[in-house]
Amino acid sequence: MQRLQKYILNNFSALFMSIFLPLFVIASVIFLIKLSTYTAVIQLSIWEMGKLYLFVLPEILFYTLPITFFIAATLSLFKLSNDNEIIVIFALGIEPGFIVKTFFKPAFILSLLLAFDFLVVSPHTTVLSKNFLSYKKSEAKFNLAASEFGNSFGDWLLYIGEKDKDGTFSKVFLFNKKQENEEILIAAKRATVINDAGILRLKLMDGEGYSYSTNKFSQVNFKAMLINDTLKADLTTYKQPLQYWLSKENAGRKKHVLIKDTLLSLFPMITLFLIASIGIVQVRHQKSKVYLYLFLTIVLYYGMTIGLEKMFQYYTILVVTLSWLIATYIFYRKTIVNKF
């Protein structure tokens, strides 16, 4: 029995990799095209694009692995049926339930990995990706350049004489009119940008500051001065995945993701009866429509997941799981058990 299980799983694993790799590449290309749209707003190097791709990699795997498992398992049984090996297995007195049990272990392991992916890994990568993009957007707003027209720096008007190769600035002037009757002018020989936990600051060195109004005039000389809290990246922090899922931020979206991803995690396990029903055929007596059934199954399952969510809320998980198991088991009994 173990040799037979190993033989079936060897056929499955060969098909699994041949199906997974093209799906993975296609999904990666789609996500990379989506990521490239960010370059219209922010500047990204090749390394930064690679970083963003690593952030979405768990999501790519989450959507490709369950579909790959379903297709590969079904086609591996279909191949064995075409070679009449399934008929030989049943002729030896082995029941169809053996086929279902053979795929149960890899399906169970895959469901656990998918659940860990979306419950634990995805919150972390989602927050990292969001914070990275938020930082890059704030950095884009902070894109200072030497210009005769000057730059806008929060509440300050900023003029930069020169931008050095090391990223520092020379001959810097800032002007701010805080109140209607008071104006502030700051001149510095050098300046540099500092990123402190997502807060971008301008550090001025070797300069003078002037404050004047109709009533008074004051001057101060300084070696270093920080212009603080001018531009701040909106960063998200969390300590544990549970804290992420229970937080009220984007609660509606998280609810939708939790329902949808839970059902997608269960997909490999609750389709085992359907895998046997579609993949096992009598090639002499049946006209197989395996590819049509594969397509309809995926569309129907995703459709039920999305369509019933508004009606049943969190109960959608229970409704879809039970109804799918009952329906596929009845189909399995009629098409496989009663015949073999």
Image: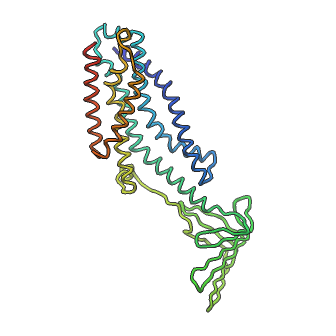
Residue 97 vertical position relative to residue 118 in the rendered view, above or below: above
- Residue 18 higher or lower than 188, as above or below: above
- Is residue 6 among what the camera can see? no
Quarter that holds the C terminus: top left
Q: Position of residue 197 (x, y in %)?
A: 53, 60
Count all numbered tags in the image, as a single digit.
Answer: 0
The one nearer the camera, 136 or 191, is 136
In the picture, measured across the screen, residue 122 lies left or right of residue 146, that is left
- Residue 57 visible in the snapshot: yes
**Residue 101: horizontal and vertical position, in percent?**
31, 22
Where the N terminus falls, by quadrant?
top left
User: Residue 118 appears in which quarter of the rendering?
Assistant: top left
Residue 270 drawn above or below residue 252 = above
Q: Quadrant of residue 178?
A: bottom right
Q: Residue at x 25, y 24 (%)?
A: 330
- Up the image or down, 334 lies above or below 134; here it is above
Name the residue at 57% across, 70% down: 228
Horizontal side of 315 relative to 4 (left or right) equals left
Q: Residue furthest bottom?
A: 215
Asked which colour scheme the image uses, the reply is rainbow
Residue 63 lies, in percent from the top left, at 44, 36
Horizontal side, residue 37 vs residue 164: left or right: left
Task: Residue 336: give x, y in percent of width and height.
Answer: 29, 17
Q: Residue at x 60, y 84 (%)?
A: 182
Q: Nearer the viewer, residue 157 or 240?
A: 157
